[in-house]
Image: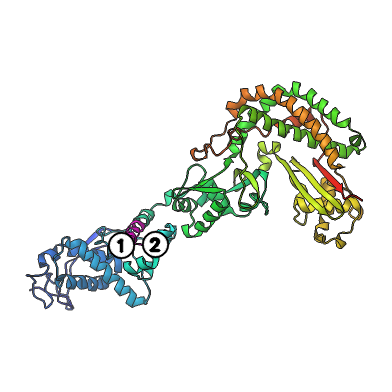
Amino acid sequence: MGVCGIHGYGKKLSVYDIHGYKKKVSVYDIHGYRKKVNVCGIHGYRKGGEHLQYSQIEEHMESILCAAMQKCGNIHDAEDLTQEVVLAALTCPREVANVKQWMLGVLNHKYYDLLRKKYRLPIISIDLVTEEAEPAYEECETDRPSEEQVRREVAYLAEKYREVIVRHYLYGEKVEEIAAALCIPKGTVLSRLAYGREQMKKGFDSMESYGKQSYRPERLEITCNGRPGLKDEPFSLVSDDLMKQNILIVAYEKPLTAVEIAKALGIPAAYIESALKKLVSSELMRTIGNRYATDFRIRTPEALERCLDVQIALTEEIYPDLLPLIHEYLESIRSLAFVGELSDGKRKKLEYYFILHLFSETLYRVGKRIFPADEVFPQRPDGGSWIAFGNRYPADFDFADARFARYSWAGERRIRWENIYNARRLELHIYDTQPELNSYSNGPVPMDDGELAKLLYLTQNGISAQTTGFNVLLLENIPHLIECGVLSGDEKHPDVALPIMRSEEYALLEQIRIKYTHKMADLFEPHLREYLPKLKLEIPKHLEGRVAEFRKYIWDSIPMVFMKKAVEEKDFDTENATPPMVFVVDERDG
């Protein structure tokens, strides 16, 4: 005698224990008697004829019940769910090519209907798009993704795939409704749903695809040549944004899709898409097809260390011929009458500034001689005209322990004000050097170069800040600026400790610098050509033709290598010579 369930269907049960091993389960009735299991019709009779044959259904019952157990987690709900599937199969009015596939699809439908009734909530499944195809199900799959994993993988999808997945599975919109809302063909919706599901399935066990940035983010410092933007771009674009910094780092070696970047960082694509758009619009990145690429050169600590040894060797070789030229250069500067009138400290700052200025311009000229192609400074959306460069470091990088950091310095910065206070023009020329690198700007109140130039003028002329609209909070920086050598005196009676001159006087110094730039370039060129192969920085393919050839070499530590050797050899005295700044002031006529 065949015993049927509450809906009239006999059941043959195979379930898995907690460790995944298959267990044979005998079904007992309420009196404890073992029951023989058959598949019966809707009224308890074996079914045959115009619909699915009972033999077709019975063949897959074990797989269906196993899948139901995996979904429900208990035998009672699994039995009920299986019975619902069998009922649908027995009443199916059409021929089915793949019975198992079809039954598993019905199982999914019934299961999510059950959950909706139970929780009154929309349910996400990535296993089924009814309008597209019959779903596949890995028999008795033991690694079904959790809700958290599903949410994670949805978040990592690119926007166009994420949108249709959310609309269809979370909000229950039909394919036709999504197509109409997004103004795209139905086929496009279906293909995006299919691709989105496939990517999600691939991602369920793809933690190994996450990059180092997902658990150990790095820092990226950006600098530039040229004229910065109105809001100090490109420095300000990523200075306080660790996510954007790491986006630029991971997309440097090769162009990546938004999803690839998201997974490398361990951040959902939904959160980085806005950042990518901003990085592209600010021209730190560009798009190549559907991929994003960092659009400027980035250097690593390893490359800087490697090239430092080469620069030290080059400088040691050239030093005996270079030193006399530098002494001759300084004597020409000292011969100018207004330089002779400067105090010892101001003259030393002036000389240090113009030594660095000479090195900077010489190395640029030599690079242009060896690689003569013009470097284009594009007009940027921010109003600037700049070329960005970057250095990447681990988040816990200690500059104090880095050998190359002791030779770091910053190229010249210039800030200009016109028709301000009683001046026709103010210009502050700055080189930052070790060990005081940027220290003057790190006082108790943040202050940029423009505000510093104003403060210097007010201090020089004894003008009260309260009467000019100057931010009086910045006056709290005066003791710090005295300590850094920018000012002298005391807090109540400060004075400017930098060399001050008119534009015409600065022009005379520039004439001398230009003359010695040619001489120094002639001396440097053959030595630099010899050492070039050891100074080359590997550039990613997508940057070829976008980075000037001479920018592919690391030789910018040479000026500080020379200065440190000159100090060690007592050929130059840097006491009271920092910071190397020059303040140019043109007063209004009359």
Displayed quadrant of residue 579: top right
Which amino acid, mark 1?
Asp
Q: Secondary structure at mark 2?
A: helix
> x%, y% of residue 400?
69, 42
Which amino acid, mark 2?
Val
Residue at the spot x=65%, y=25% of the render? Answer: 528
- Mark 1 and 2 residues: CB-CB less than 8 Å, in contact? no
Q: Is residue 187 inside the magenta stretch?
A: yes
Q: Which residue is label 1 attached to?
A: 127
Residues drawn in magenta: 183-197
Q: Which residue is label 2 attached to?
A: 150
Using a 10 Å C-alpha cutoff, classify the residue at mark 1 as few (fewer than 14 neighbours), some (14 to 19) or many (20 or more): some
Depth check: give the residue in front, 109 or 94: 94
Displayed quadrant of residue 298: top right
Q: Is residue 447 inside the magenta stretch?
A: no
* Relative vertical location of residue 450 with respect to residue 14 in this rendering, above or below: above
> x%, y% of residue 404?
66, 36
Secondary structure mainly formed by the magenta segment: helix
Using a 10 Å C-alpha cutoff, classify the residue at mark 2 as few (fewer than 14 neighbours), some (14 to 19) or many (20 or more): some
Quadrant including the N terminus = bottom left
- Asked whether, in this view, residue 166 is left or right of residue 77, the answer is right
- Asked if residue 232 can be seen in this view, the reply is yes
